[in-house]
Image (cartoon, rainbow, N blue to C red):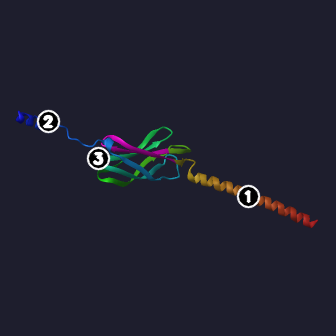
Amino acid sequence: MCLSAFFLLLVLASTAPTILPTASAIRCQTQITNVGYPAAVESNQNVEVQTNLMVSCTTSMIDIAGRVDLTDEASNKTLSIQGFHVGYVSEPLKSSNFTVTNAAQAPSGSTVWKLKVVILVFAGSQLIDTTGKSVEILVGGGTSELLILTLSAALVVVVIILVFVMVRRSRVKSRKRR
């Protein structure tokens, strides 16, 4: 009887599932340290948005990876997706820095293009952290056209001031002659 109980325990032990940590036990914190993008672009111009981020995770026997989505806030359309890989974390708390570049084409016309950088971090297939940041880019009207418009307005102001000064001088001179 003791021998059959021993075999039963041996069979149960060999068929028991291996206990691995679940993705829900893994904690990651993601921080956007910088987002680089042009302040103004031409209509339909190709644009790159560079995101610097830091991901800090607890020990993990599950592969950790993430992605950076570039989304148009007005349409909620994802324009670009780029991935990054943290890997397995053997230390109690590991921080990794990444620079991820997303590319998109600016819309046509003149507008303020509102974009959102969204970072998603996964342990296996389970989402474990997300963060985001909004950015705005001036599109169209051309940066050169905007400069010309600004210079033209400044020139008009200078001409008005010069005319005012010349008229005033001529009035002063005419009064002195009398």
Query: What residue did someone put label 3 on?
Result: 63
Query: What residue did someone put label 1 on?
Result: 159
Tell me if I can see residue 50 in this picture. Answer: no
Q: Nearer the viewer, mark 2 or mark 1?
A: 2
Residue 121 lies in the magenta-colored region: yes
* Viewer-proximal residue among 141 and 94: 94
Position of residue 46 measured from the top left corner of the image (x, y, whole percent): 46, 49
The magenta-colored residue range is: 115-135
* Viewer-proximal residue among 153 and 7: 7
Magenta portion: prevailing SS class = strand
The mark that comes first in sequence, 2 or 1, is 2
Q: Nearer the viewer, mark 1 or mark 3?
A: 3
Amino acid marked by disc 2:
Leu
Q: Is residue 34 left or right of residue 24?
A: right
Mark 2 neighbour class, 10 Å CA radius: few under 14, some 14 to 19, many 20 or more: few
For the point 34% across and 53% down, which residue is it?
93
* Viewer-proximal residue among 49 and 63: 63
Q: Is residue 14 left or right of residue 37?
A: left
SS of the residue at dot 1? helix
Q: Is residue 170 left or right of residue 132?
A: right
Amino acid marked by disc 3:
Asp
Position of residue 99 measured from the top left corner of the image (x, y, whole percent): 39, 54
SS of the residue at dot 2? helix
Q: Is residue 152 left or right of residue 123?
A: right
Position of residue 153 measured from the top left corner of the image (x, y, whole percent): 68, 54
Position of residue 110 measured from the top left corner of the image (x, y, whole percent): 56, 44
